[in-house]
């Protein structure tokens, strides 16, 4: 079987640190050198108004699968980058944080190498991703009633499932954003990080509808070598147990807005998700 997988290009690729990145076949099927970014043109803009977005990234690289093998992951560059491009084009400013201030981890194998807009974005944010702010420090000192922040953004990639769903500081920030009537944005596996918002009082998103990457699709991806084993846990299942309804069954372009929560289903949703988030918050800024 392993010989056949190699012959078909479906064997995950070993990394220098003992993990695995997706197979050549998986990369061919699931990634692209370009994106469908629409240019991010907006008639209105909040440039110069100091309306800020807190982007919470993972600082962990490897996910241990249920068979003990490690998947080399992080935040997905398309799911992170296209919404960022839209938000920046609309005049919002983006601050990057990770749990302790360690470097943000990016799934470099998914980087669209021929997409100039995404390439320029990551060049411009390279230092901020390498040396982000600390979520712990933000939670300790910035949760005020006069904050310039208008949204918390949880980009996708399986890395959103590493260290964030159980992070108490993220829980504080999400509950603060909810109480302050700020927007929360999450795409693909990003909604997994919303699990941090559960405390002894309950789950603030109980009764919400969301778009998210389906557990059923994650279950299929090892067949093409996208991951070296099956997932160690299912974030959609956990969200559902807490009262969430996931509206999509496919890893498609689905996006959804429920109150101040805006979500998207997969990399295919990155462009419409970014536009929906930018347009919704621009409209809100005019009220």
Image (cartoon, rainbow, N blue to C red):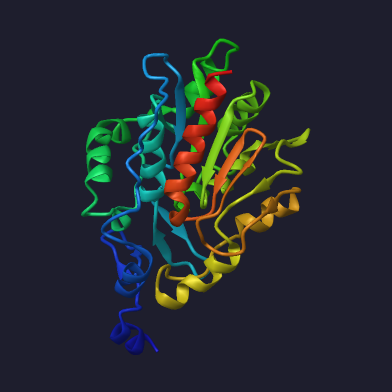
Please tell me which residue lies in front, 149 or 271. 271
Query: Percent x, y for residue 244?
Result: 71, 49
Give the residue at x 52% y 28%.
281
Residue 99 visible in the picture: no
User: Based on the displayed image, in which of its 4 quarters is residue 29 positioned?
Assistant: bottom left
Question: What residue is drawn where x is 32% and y is 54%?
Answer: 35
Instruction: Using the rendered view, name the quadrant where residue 240 is placed.
Output: bottom right
Horizontally, residue 139 falls left or right of residue 239, namely left
Tell me: residue 152, above or below residue 11: above
Quarter assignment of residue 198: top right
Q: 89 or 9, which is in the foreground?
A: 89
Count of numbered circles on the image: 0
Task: Reply above or below: 197 against 45.
Answer: below
| Lateral position of residue 171 relative to residue 119, left or right | right
Q: In the picture shown, does residue 54 fall above or below 238? A: above
Q: Residue at x 50, y 20 (%)?
A: 149
Where is residue 161 shown, x and y percent of the image? 52, 50
Q: Name the residue located 41 percent from the left edge and 32 percent from the top edge.
A: 87
> Residue 150: where, in percent of width, then height?
52, 23
| Residue sticking out furthest to the front | 43
Specify the quadrant that holds the N terminus: bottom left
Instruction: Residue 138: tell me if it is visible.
Output: yes
Residue at the extreme right: 201
Q: Residue 272, percent across and down?
A: 47, 47
* Residue 142 falls left or right of residue 6: right
Q: Quadrant of the C terminus?
A: top right
Q: Is residue 159 above or below residue 151?
A: below
């Amino acid at each position: 079987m392993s010989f056949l997988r190699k012959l078909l290009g479906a064997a995950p690729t070993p990394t220098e640190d003992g993990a695995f990145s997706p197979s050549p076949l998986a990369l061919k099927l699931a990634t692209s050198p370009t994106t469908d970014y629409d240019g991010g043109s907006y008639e209105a803009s909040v440039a110069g108004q100091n309306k800020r977005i807190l982007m919470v990234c993972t600082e962990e690289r490897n996910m241990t699968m249920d068979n003990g093998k490690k998947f080399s992951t992080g935040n997905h560059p398309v799911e992170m980058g296209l919404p960022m491009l839209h938000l920046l084009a609309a005049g919002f400013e983006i601050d990057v944080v990770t749990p302790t201030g360690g470097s943000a981890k990016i799934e470099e194998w998914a980087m669209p190498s021929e997409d100039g807009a995404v390439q320029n974005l990551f060049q411009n944010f390279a230092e901020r991703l390498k040396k982000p702010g600390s979520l712990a420090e933000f939670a300790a000192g910035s949760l005020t009633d006069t904050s310039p922040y208008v949204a918390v953004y949880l980009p996708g990639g399986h890395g959103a499932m590493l260290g964030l769903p159980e992070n108490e500081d993220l829980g504080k920030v999400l509950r603060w954003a909810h109480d302050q009537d700020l927007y929360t944005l999450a795409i693909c596996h990003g909604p997994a990080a919303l699990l941090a918002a559960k405390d002894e009082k309950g789950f603030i998103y109980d009764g919400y509808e969301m778009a998210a990457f389906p557990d059923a699709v994650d279950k299929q991806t090892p067949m093409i070598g996208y991951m070296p084993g099956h997932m160690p846990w299912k974030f959609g299942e956990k969200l559902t147990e807490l009262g969430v309804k996931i509206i999509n069954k496919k890893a498609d372009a689905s996006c959804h807005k429920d109150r101040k929560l805006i979500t998207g289903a997969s990399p295919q949703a990155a462009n419409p998700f970014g536009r929906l988030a930018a347009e919704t918050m621009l409209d809100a800024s005019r009220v």
